[in-house]
Amino acid sequence: MPDSIQLNQPVSSDLVGYTALYALAVEEVLADPVVAQGQVIGDLELREGAGWHELKVTPGSIKFSEPPKANGRHGTIYPTKVTAQRGHPNAQTLYALDTMERRRYLVSVRDTSGRLRLIGNRQQYLTFAAGTEGSSPSARAGVDLSFTGDTLMRAPYYLGSFPLTSGGYVPVPSGPITGSVELRTAGGRLLATVPAGKRIVLRSGFKLSYEIE
């Protein structure tokens, strides 16, 4: 097992589960997040005035899964699914769900300790769908909400700014920003190691081609 995998850390005593669900349309995101060591570096860059939509759902109904799946020569992918339920929808709720159907989203879930996971990006997004449940007398009347898609990495934690469309911000637990990004040539030569939280400024006038791994 690689030394970088630290599974010997103390386990949190918090209950496992998610308490809130948020969605952000892909078109509102200006740049994909930079991720290092399981955490997004800095703030997600959004269009002016953009914010996350908090989806009010039945408490305890949020589920999030991202099981790894081998993808041949392309490595590992994570078929991702976020689901929740909302009971007794009214006409306005159904109309809102219609406007969201099949659209592309980034999704965030908040766990019981208040931490946020950022799921997806502009290229590896999740697609929304909703279906009515309660077809039998014993079932609860409501709607099933789901976001599904394939991603190339596990959803990182997010500690940056988190504005809401309803106004205000979601409080995010503070924590140290750690890790670094290596800037290398196509041949593998190391040009610089950039500490987490710093920016890379490109000053050359030549056309730049790059790949984020």
Image: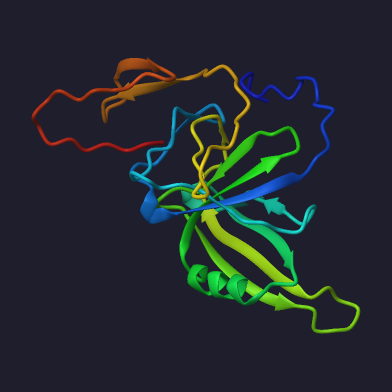
Q: Nearer the viewer, residue 1 or 41?
A: 41
Which quadrant holds residue 180?
Answer: top left
Which quadrant holds residue 84?
Answer: bottom right
Residue lying at 46% horizontally and 47% vertically, measured from the top left:
51
Q: What colouring method underlies this structural image?
A: rainbow
Which quadrant holds residue 115?
Answer: top right
| Figure quadrant of the N terminus | top right
Residue extending furthest front?
Answer: 167
Q: Position of residue 174 (x, y in %)?
A: 60, 22
Residue lying at 60% horizontally and 30% vertically, measured from the top left:
172
Relative to 137, residue 174 above or below: above
Q: Nearer the viewer, residue 38 or 96?
A: 96
In this image, 44 relative to 6: left or right? Answer: left
Relative to 14, residue 55 above or below: below
In this image, 172 relative to 182: left or right? Answer: right
Residue lying at 30% horizontally and 24% vertically, measured from the top left:
184
| Figure quadrant of the C terminus | top left
Q: Nearer the viewer, residue 187 or 77?
A: 77
Count of labels shown?
0
Q: Position of residue 3 (x, y in %)?
A: 64, 18
